[in-house]
Amino acid sequence: MSTENKTRVVTTYRLSEMKARGEKISMLTAYDFSMAKILDEAGIDVILVGDSAANVMAGHRTTVPITLDHMIYHAQSVVRAVNRALVVVDLPFGTYQGNSKQALASAIRIMKETEADAVKMEGGEEILESVQRILSAGIPVMGHLGLTPQSIHKFGTYTVRAREEEEAKKLVKDALILEQAGCFGIVLEKIPASLAERVASQTKIPMIGIGAGNGVDGQVLVVHDMLGINKDFSPRFLRRYADLYTTMKGAFEQYIGDVKSGDFPSNKEQYME
Ligand code: KIV
């Protein structure tokens, strides 16, 4: 592959052009090579190597336990599969809050060791110094406001955020601060649709919603949720595009039955010499 072709087709610049012309941005999570390859070939614009890997890949109750090494492993697997989509990697809890030098070191590890395109960070004004330091090193940053799962122990609930005026005002202010700092986009999670639409109309960078209504510039979902692999998670905002739990369980049951009965492998499925 020539050097020119190494740049992925979807860039942060292209995302801002998409917002300017009103083209919606599609984004889904991936954590492994096989899923990322299908997503990229389907034409997804952005792949998020989310710290939701802590939940769906590792079975943790929150995203708090996942480490930078784990995120790098997942991101390396995803990046190997992707030719077109922009790959964004979550900076995990404890690797950027409160110490901007540590934040930069974490972001540099992600960029150097995975060859991803950008990092994502949860929070507004409180993490501004870290955001600025990372941006000053030339690393694109995506923000994340509203329900920020790394702060779940502070919130104490996964319910809709920013319903109260004070929290809504802070969210708008944070979005403007992140835009001003140079972030290329922001994820808005689980906030009232009217508030999300207001933020999207006041900013030039794309607002990508999850549980934030249809007035934003794009949508993101956790891939296991939209494929119906996870049956125990049914928030209002989730649209399931498949029922892979049932399909996969059925296939496993059939395989187990075929092995037990001796039906598998058949003569056609073995080497006769
Ligand atoms: O980690 C993740 O999957 C996310 C999405 C919910 C936006 O941050």
Image (cartoon, rainbow, N blue to C red):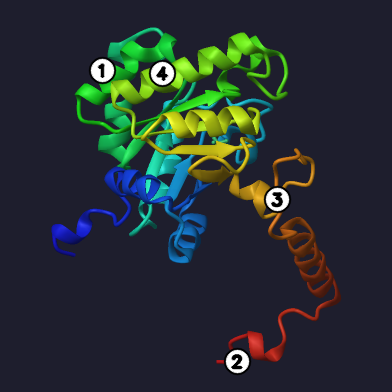
Depicted 174 relative to depicted 2: above or below: above
Dot 4 or dot 2: first in sequence order is: 4
For marks 4 and 3 on the same chain, the one whose residue lies earlier in the sequence: 4
Under mark 4, the amino acid is: Thr
Tell me the residue that label 3 is attached to: 239
Closer to the chain start, of discs 1 and 4, is 4
Where residue 151 appears, as percent x and y from the top left, is 58, 16
Which three-letter amino acid code belongs to the residue tagged 1?
A: Arg
Tag nearer the camera, 4 or 2? 4
Locate residue 121, reporting x and y percent: 43, 25
Secondary structure under the numbered disc 1 in the rendered image: helix
Numbered tag placed on residue 95 in the rendering: 4
Tell which circle, 2 or 3, labels the residue nearer the N-terminal end. 3
Disc 2 secondary structure class:
loop
Instruction: Return the disc, 2 or 1, that comes first in the chain's sequence.
Output: 1
Question: Which of the numbered marks, if any, corresponds to residue 133?
Answer: 1
Q: Which residue is mark 2?
A: 272
- Residue 16: x %, y % from top left: 33, 43
Of circles 2 and 3, which is in front?
Answer: 3
Q: CA distance from mark 2 to mark 1?
A: 64 Å
249 above or below 166? below
Mark 4, other Cα within 10 Å: few <14 / some 14–19 / many ≥20: some
- Depth-wise, is mark 2 or mark 1 nearer the camera? 1
Disc 2 residue type (three-letter): Met
For the C terminus, which image quadrant? Answer: bottom right
Label 3 and label 1: CA atoms lie apart by 37 Å
Q: Which of the labelled discs sits on residue 2, or is there none?
A: none
Name the residue rendered at 58%, 87% in the picture. Answer: 271
Which of label 1 and label 4 is nearer to you?
1
208 or 48: nearer the viewer: 208
Residue 267 appears in the figure: yes
> In 3D space, how far apart are the residues under numbered discs 1 and 4 (Cα atoms)?
14 Å
